[in-house]
Amino acid sequence: MAQLQVRPLAEENFPEKTGGNWKKYFTFNTDHKVIGIQYLVTSFIFFLIGGALATGVRIELATPDVDFVSRELYNQLFTIHATVMIFLWIVPAGTGAFGNYLLPLLLGCNDMAFPRLNAIAFWMIPPGGLLLMGSFFINEGAAASGWTSYPPLSLVNGKSGEFIWILSILVLGTSSILGAINFLTTIIKMRTPGMKFNNMPLFCWAMFAASILILVSTPVLAGALILLSFDLLAGTSFFNPSGGGDPVVYQHMFWFYSHPAVYIMILPVFGTISEILPVHARKPIFGYLAIAYSSLAISFLGLIVWAHHMFTSGTPAWLRMFFMIATMVIAVPTGIKVFSWLATLWGGKLRLNSAMLFAMGFISMFVIGGLSGVMVASVPFDIHVHDTYFVVAHLHYVLFGGSVFGLYASIYHWFPKMTGRMINETWGRIHFVLTLVGFNLCFLPMHYLGLMGMPRRVAEYDPQFATINTICSIGSYILAVSTIPFVINAVVCWRSGEKAPANPWNGLTLEWTLSSPPPEHNFPTPPVLKTGPYDYGTLDKRGSKKRPISQLRASDILSN
């Protein structure tokens, strides 16, 4: 395959580079690239902690009896596991890490719109996470009412741990809101000259849609949690039925955020997948505008489907019908993306490196999660499998098979740009195989458990489910082990890997015109585009003849 040779912009224009001094990653730094890496490393540490909690859950569930941890500790483990994975791993890694690192580079600007606000948003993450994990060490223990924290259970079940959980989520939610303000302002106001909305990279569209969701839905969750804390500590009765409160109102407020949160977690990954596939398939992205506008459609529809989580909460039949139809309709813009990605792969010159393998794994795993999502959108089926392991399987195929596979693909793809070093592809492929096998062995059998009626969130269960649960636990152990080659690979290659060129993947977006890692202030002058971000093989806009990619130079992408 012909190799794209991009001539980086003159090195003398960049007196300082991001990299080198590791101490800056532990300081209040306003460089968006440093903040992006701070988000990524911090959230990955919490991912390892959340994975350890999940392993504890699966060790307990390997047998029908309570023989590893107490019932009380088991409830705390699955509650904090889910909270960590959502609020401290997927959300900050997708929006915070890649949003911060990539947006200014893709848009051709030197930093985010509000650099200090950006740094403040990150430095709210470690205290929020430490507060949550520290709740294990108080007398009453951590929160134990599930990550949904439904009243009245949450009002009587470990009040101190529950209040710490609420406080932690409020801190993390505030960080998310501050980040969304920054992302929207940067996208709207700071695009390089010549970059209109309809020719900016698809990751920018995804971040635009996700940021709107964050700003609209997160304050509603904050309001629900503040009122819940009043019930918990001050004896009010907003949601407490013993005092005339309505716990179903809490469910509405909670799910008005928490279902859009699924799209807050997955939309940035949709964006990175749309950047990765055309580069490693050597083809223009199929259906650029359809992918871009489908992100906005998901953002809108995601706000009107929340009550499908409440089909068993006394929801009126006419309201069930509305939310069932809306939930099924939201599969349409998601399907547009999937078919566009498959069309991009079709006939391409696929480069099956670690980034591409995880990207294709993402598509296949997410489609399984999407299909089961359409199933639970149907009221009769949802009533049958509600609060069973079918829901656990669906959730993890969407959020681990989707978001986490996509995050791994993104790390492998932009690792050379972030660190200036190439990652070891052999260990990357080992990581992919272990992750794929462990994930499917753990979660695929859970669909059957749910259909047979095994309830979730219980430490002991009917012995007839023991064999399948043992299989699921073995899969979880493989999944836990799969992180070891990744961590070793990333650390060793960051320290002493092969030096990365400016453009190891022959990409056409603006970050690949800079050195690896990029200089501190990105572009010496605002770059002016001469080609689109996905114009592989179609670079001659005047139409007579196409330039072979082996003859492409930086001047074909930029007009300085």
Image (spheres, rainbow, N blue to C red):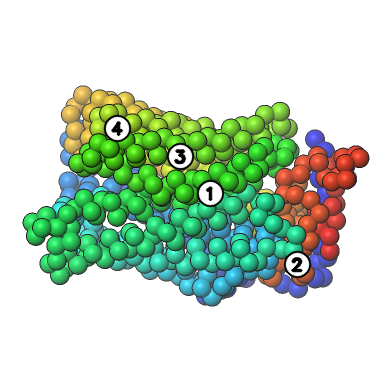
The reply to whether the C-beta atoms of the residues labelled 3 and 2 are less than 8 Å apart is no
- Whichever of callouts 4 and 1 sits on the residue coming sooner in the sequence is 1
Mark 4 lies on residue? 379
Mark 2 lies on residue? 526
- Whichever of callouts 2 and 4 sits on the residue coming sooner in the sequence is 4
Q: Position of residue 403 (x, y in %)?
A: 48, 45
Residue 236 appears anywhere in the view: yes
Q: As displayed, is residue 135 above or below residue 259?
A: below
Residue 33 appears anywhere in the view: no
Residue occupying image coordinates x 40% and y 67%: 174
- Whichever of callouts 1 and 2 sits on the residue coming sooner in the sequence is 1
Amino acid type, label 3? Ile
Query: Which mark, by number, is residue 296?
Result: 1
- Whichever of callouts 1 and 3 sits on the residue coming sooner in the sequence is 1
Amino acid type, label 4? Val
Dividing the image into 4 quarters, which one contains the N terminus?
Answer: top right
Tag 2: Cα neighbours inside 10 Å, few (<14), some, or many (≥20)?
Answer: some
Tag 3: Cα neighbours inside 10 Å, few (<14), some, or many (≥20)?
Answer: many
Q: Report the Cα–Cα distance between label 4 and label 3.
A: 16 Å
Q: Which residue of the protein is positioned furthest toward the right in this rendering?
A: 544
Q: Position of residue 475 (x, y in %)?
A: 39, 34
Disc 1, SS: helix
Along the line of sight, which residue is nearer the eye, 513 or 344? 344
Left or right of 9? Residue 25 is left
Hey, which quadrant is residue 61 in on the image?
A: top left
Residue occupying image coordinates x 27% and y 29%: 380
Query: Which mark, by number, is residue 330?
Result: 3
Dividing the image into 4 quarters, which one contains the C terminus?
Answer: bottom right
Q: Position of residue 141 (x, y in %)?
A: 20, 59
Amino acid type, label 1? Leu
Observer-side mark, 2 or 4, equals: 4
Observer-side mark, 1 or 2, equals: 1
